[in-house]
Amino acid sequence: MLTEPHANVTFTASDRITLSGNRFVDLGGAGVSFAYGSSDNLVQGNEFTAIASTALLLGCTADPTR
């Protein structure tokens, strides 16, 4: 079974979110996650530094309908 790291900022079923000009620094897990049907989101001009897992998680490893 795959497990995914917890993210410091998580969006679920979110549309048209814009993250711009932010700093994600010295974080455990992932920086930002977009999961479960999120679409038309923009992550542009942000800084991701010293992240323990990954900067962005797109999608998910679990089906929320189960």
Image (cartoon, rainbow, N blue to C red):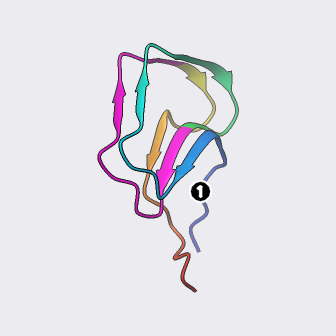
**Residue, far front:** 16
Instruction: Name above or below for residue 40 compared with residue 65.
Output: above
Q: Position of residue 61 (x, y in %)?
A: 51, 67
Asked which secondary structure carries label 1, the reply is loop
Image quarter of the N terminus: bottom right
Image quarter of the C terminus: bottom right
Q: Which residue shows up at 56% across the image and 67% down it?
A: 2
Image label count: 1
Q: Residue under circle 1?
A: 4
Q: Which residue shows up at 59% across the image and 56% down it?
A: 4
Q: Position of residue 53 (x, y in %)?
A: 58, 38
The question of residue 53 being in magenta is answered with no
Q: Residue 6 vs residue 59: left or right?
A: right
The question of residue 40 being in magenta is answered with yes
Instruction: Name above or below for residue 59 compared with residue 18.
Output: below
Instruction: Name above or below for residue 52 compared with residue 48.
Output: below
Of the pair 31 and 54, the residue shown nearer to us: 31
Instruction: Name above or below for residue 17 compared with residue 57.
Output: above
Q: Position of residue 8 (x, y in %)?
A: 66, 37
Magenta span of residues: 32-48
Q: Position of residue 58 (x, y in %)?
A: 42, 50
The quarter holding residue 26 reads: top right
**Residue, far bottom:** 66
Label 1: few (<14), some (14–19) or many (≥20) C-alpha neighbours in 10 Å: few
Tell me the kind of residue under disc 1: Glu
Of the pair 39 and 30, the residue shown nearer to us: 39
The quarter holding residue 21 reads: top left
Of the pair 64 and 5, the residue shown nearer to us: 64
